[in-house]
């Protein structure tokens, strides 16, 4: 586990909350409204965000948390013994932080197990009835470790709207808004603004993200081309910025 940043908000004893999102960047962006909502509901709490290493760069600029920890999990995701040993090792680092509440935003059974092992008295997760997951620990088999079970329609909802009901279930209050956020460093924002101004002054830019972890999420190139041609016909003078990683 690696600590990315620490932003103390005062020295007095406060409610300690752990937000656990051990997934990719896209789902992490969709979780941003829920993270913002936790800060709104618990304005004086000490909030720690635990994320997978792929979300590290974005998480470290999140304005709603006091500390970001990275779960640099490098074990076999399908090996129950390796996953359990990793959870135990990570939990020993989390236990001294004495969390009062853990919000587990992931539907992996191993993440539920970790929320219990980290010592949080109150463990908020999804109701395991109605769905199971892949991996060595089926979510519905470890659902007993969850103290507060929020309803989840895994197959009927986009992940952007899946996390917020968890906060609403705990507070009994409606969410203010579900607008996702992408957090970046101010210097990065200024650098890209300068570059885009040089490349096409006065033009509107549309970013196209090609990334997808799994092959089933990859869209054919011809489909992208058709979509961009349609946008050009509708919007006129626009420029496209293609984003992706080395594999894209």
Image (cartoon, grey):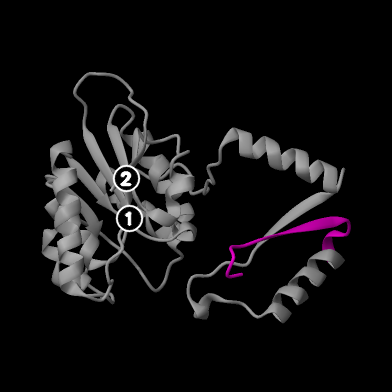
In this view of the protein, can residue 131 be seen by the observer?
no
- Disc 2 crowd rating (10 Å Cα; few below 14, some 14-19, many 20+) is few
87 or 180, nearer to the observer: 87
Q: Secondary structure at mark 1?
A: loop
Residue at 11% of width from left, 46% of height from top?
119
Residue at 44% of width from left, 40% of height from top?
60
Q: Number of numbered discs present? A: 2
The residue at which mark 2 appears reads as 2
233 or 214, nearer to the observer: 214
Q: Quick check: 124 above or below 39?
A: below
Where does the magenta region start and end?
234-248
Q: Quadrant of residue 72?
A: bottom left
Q: Quadrant of residue 151?
A: bottom left
The residue at which mark 1 appears reads as 72
Residue at 53% of width from left, 70% of height from top?
212
Q: Whole-percent x and y of residue 101?
A: 20, 43
Q: Quick check: 68 above or below 220?
A: above
Q: Secondary structure at mark 2?
A: strand
Q: Quadrant of residue 77?
A: bottom left
Q: Is 91 left or right of 4, judged from the image as shown?
A: left
Name the N-terminal-most of marks 2 and 1. Answer: 2
Q: Whole-percent x and y of residue 155?
A: 39, 74
Inspect the magenta stretch and tell me whether residue 238 lies in it: yes
Inspect the magenta stretch and tell me whether residue 229 lies in it: no
Marks 2,1: beta carbons within 8 A:
yes
In this view of the protein, can residue 77 be seen by the observer?
yes
Label 2, label 1: how far apart the Cα atoms are = 7 Å
Q: Whole-percent x and y of residue 67?
A: 33, 36
Q: Is 247 left or right of 236, judged from the image as shown?
A: left
- Disc 1 crowd rating (10 Å Cα; few below 14, some 14-19, many 20+) is some
Q: Quick check: 169 above or below 13?
A: below
């Amino acid at each position: 586990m690696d600590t990315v940043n620490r932003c103390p908000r005062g020295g007095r004893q406060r409610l300690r909350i752990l937000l656990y999102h051990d997934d990719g960047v896209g789902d992490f962006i969709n979780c941003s409204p829920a993270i913002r909502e936790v800060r709104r509901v618990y304005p004086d709490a000490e909030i720690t965000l635990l994320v997978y290493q792929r979300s590290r760069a974005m998480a470290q600029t999140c304005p709603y948390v006091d500390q970001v920890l990275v779960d640099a999990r490098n074990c076999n995701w399908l090996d129950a013994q390796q996953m359990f040993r990793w959870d135990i090792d990570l939990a020993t680092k989390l236990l001294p932080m004495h969390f009062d509440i853990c919000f587990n935003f992931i539907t992996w059974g191993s993440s539920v197990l970790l929320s219990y092992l980290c010592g949080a008295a109150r463990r908020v997760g999804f109701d395991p009835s109605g769905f199971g997951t892949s991996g060595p620990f089926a979510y519905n088999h470890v659902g007993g470790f969850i103290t507060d079970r929020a309803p989840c329609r895994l197959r009927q909802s986009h992940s952007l709207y899946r996390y917020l009901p968890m906060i609403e279930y705990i507070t009994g209050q409606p969410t203010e808004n579900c607008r996702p956020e992408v957090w970046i460093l101010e210097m990065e924002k200024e650098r890209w603004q300068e570059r885009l101004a040089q490349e096409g002054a006065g033009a509107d830019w549309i970013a196209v993200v090609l990334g997808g972890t799994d092959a089933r999420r990859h869209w054919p190139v011809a489909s992208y081309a058709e979509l961009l041609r349609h946008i050009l016909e509708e919007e006129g003078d626009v420029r496209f910025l293609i984003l992706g990683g080395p594999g894209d």
